[in-house]
Image (cartoon, rainbow, N blue to C red):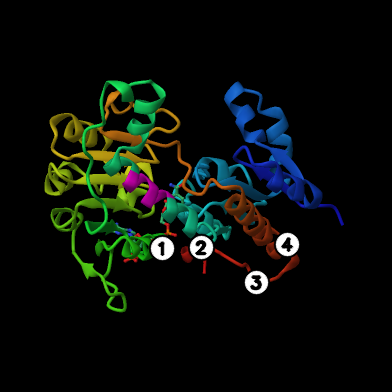
Amino acid sequence: MSRPELLTVARLAPFLMEPLQAAFTVHDRLHESLLDNDTSAFATAAPRIRAICGSGESKVGADLLAQLPALEIVSIMGVGYDGVDVAACKARGVVVTHTPDVLNDDVADLALALMLDVARRIPQADRHVREGRWPQGNMPLARKMSGARLGLVGMGRIAQAIAQRALAFGMSIAYTARSAKPALPYAFHATPAALAAASDFLVVITPGGAATRKLIDATVLDALGPKGYLVNVARGSVVDESALIAALQKGTIAGAALDVFENEPHVPEALRAMDNVVLTPHIGSATSATRQAMADLAFENLAAHFAGRPLPSPVPECR
Ligand code: NAP
């Protein structure tokens, strides 16, 4: 039997591309040729494409779906799938899968690292030494993290891994989410603003998409206050970036550490210019071990679908 045809919608790492190429006829980002007005190759292949494989940042919109009449499955290598129009997929009977859990440790590790970075000013301290400024004087004193109040916006898989780590730092933990989790020993606040008012570190770890767009706005930042730090490891869309820049410039909050941005990979000059900000380029899950585990799970979802086996990790809407 001929191999199923698959479209990639991200530049995928070799450790995913190689197994894909062994099992599928892969059209590597062929739809992007549309941007160059070269529609012929894509138009020829499109009616035969039965699978899409992409990353957490991939866009799979209704326009692309409409061009793929034989599509059966979208496999995302990432836990967030806010770029996928899941409603349009479901309406067409297309199943969507993602890679939850295998990245919890790495994203939680990064969240704690960013909290320490912004409070203890570790990137600035590194620059202080490298740039030969130490002989002229010591760094200004920084902020203690152990024992501080952590507020988690979201209390899902990754947030719970962050909370476990924060307990080892003697932090008190509170959270907001769509619903309270009575089984967890943490205080629930009904809104991000109420949580921010009770937090020293506000860490954002919800999904992206329309439901959480600008959930962290000027009101929440005001509530966090001039001694509070914002850490975003969720999606850039969850934070009102203009309001954040204004809050940092005015001293409404003490600082921010950001792994995600509204318009990646472009980061506003205003953020890059500020000294009370730590910036990383969306590296939450970016270790070799975790990316391999994510690739294996993304591949296994595709393999299971075409072998008629139960899918390991469909998104909640497709269960
Ligand atoms: P999860 O287990 O589904 O948890 C999501 C949490 O967000 C849940 O507690 C949920 O509340 C809460 N939530 C959803 N909508 C909300 C809203 N409108 N207001 C308040 N809370 C809301 O997801 P996860 O596995 O922890 O992953 C979370 C997200 O992290 C992903 O979707 C992705 O965007 C991001 N992420 C980023 C990186 C990175 O590289 N920086 C890596 C991996 C993941 P309920 O529990 O009440 O439903």
User: Image quadrant of ligand 1?
Assistant: bottom left
Q: What secondary structure is marked by label 4?
A: helix
Task: Please state which amino acid type lies under the numbered disc 2.
Answer: Asp
> Where's residue 301, x and y in %?
65, 61
Residue 55 drawn in magenta: no
Q: Which mark is residue 161?
A: 1
Q: Residue at 18% x, 31% y: name it.
A: 246
Disc on the earlier residue, 1 or 4: 1
Disc on the earlier residue, 2 or 4: 2
Work out how far the residue at label 3 is from the one at label 4, CA to CA, in angstroms.
10 Å
| Residue on which disc 2 sits | 101
> Where's residue 294, x and y in %?
60, 55
Q: Which mark is residue 306?
A: 4
**Residue situated in front as seen by the camera: 130 or 273:** 130
Q: Disc 1 vs disc 2: Cβ atoms closer than 8 Å?
A: no
Outermost residue toward the bottom?
A: 183
Task: Please state which amino acid type lies under the numbered disc 3.
Answer: Pro
Asked if disc 2 is less than 8 Å from ligand 1, the answer is yes
